[in-house]
Amino acid sequence: MPLGGGSKCGCCQKTVYFAEEVQCEGKSWHKSCFLCMVCKKNLDSTTVAVHVDEIYCKSCYGKKYGPKGYGFGGGAGCLSMDTGEGLGIKPEVQEAHRPTSNPNASKLAQKAGGSDVCTRCGKAVYAAEKVIGAGNSWHKGCFRCAKCGKGLESTTLADKDGEIYCKGCYAKNFGPKGFGFGQGAGALAHSQ
């Protein structure tokens, strides 16, 4: 403890006396200095998140240092329109859907640096983003119908030659044809 009675504040570096002290990660802070480094909200033991010598509220900490990508607050359930640009975070640009370009899609468990390779885009698929369908690994975002681009689940999936389709596109392109199968007399659908 330095001469003068108290420790130095982690923010303003002035002496912190016992009556105004807040301790976090072995350091002392003035109650008035114990604020988020970004949004300046008052913090307490339940709302503080520490990164090296910096303190943040959990929201700002998550935006700056938390996980990024699909399933981490960027989807349909996310209410915030804040992209984090004020924290130095660059927004991600979503790529358009494209059909599988892998010529040998039927190979099971293709490897690239210890992780599986996505059948659709050919990039590494890690456990947090991996979906298995038709005996292959896919990114959650690539797990879509090859014809219409509709997102798929295990219950809406049909596969042919290593490619995946929604049940509607599969039936239309590979299902039985003729009288009694929706293509004959009395069928309401217009065939091409």
Image (cartoon, rainbow, N blue to C red):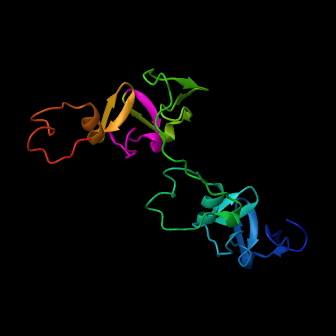
Looking at the picture, how far across and down is residue 174, in whole percent?
27, 31
Q: Quadrant of the C terminus?
A: top left
Relative height, residue 175 to residue 63 (above, below): above
Q: Which residues are magenta?
A: 135-154
Residue 21 located left or right of residue 104:
right
Looking at the picture, how far across and down is residue 180, in whole percent?
9, 35
Q: Residue furthest right?
A: 3
Looking at the picture, how far across and down is residue 29, in whole percent?
75, 70
Looking at the picture, how far across and down is residue 107, in whole percent?
45, 20
Would you say residue 81 sits in the magenta stretch? no
Q: Residue at x 74, y 55 (%)?
A: 52
Q: Quadrant of the N terminus?
A: bottom right
Residue 17 located left or right of residue 144:
right
Could you say which quadrant of the image residue 171 lies in?
top left
Could you say which quadrant of the image residue 164 lies in?
top left
Would you say residue 148 sits in the magenta stretch? yes
Front in this rendered view, residue 72 or 108: 108
Front in this rendered view, residue 94 or 88: 94
Residue 137 located left or right of residue 47:
left
Q: Total label count?
A: 0
Could you say which quadrant of the image residue 134 lies in?
top left
Front in this rendered view, residue 120 or 7: 120
Q: Residue at x 37, y 44 (%)?
A: 148
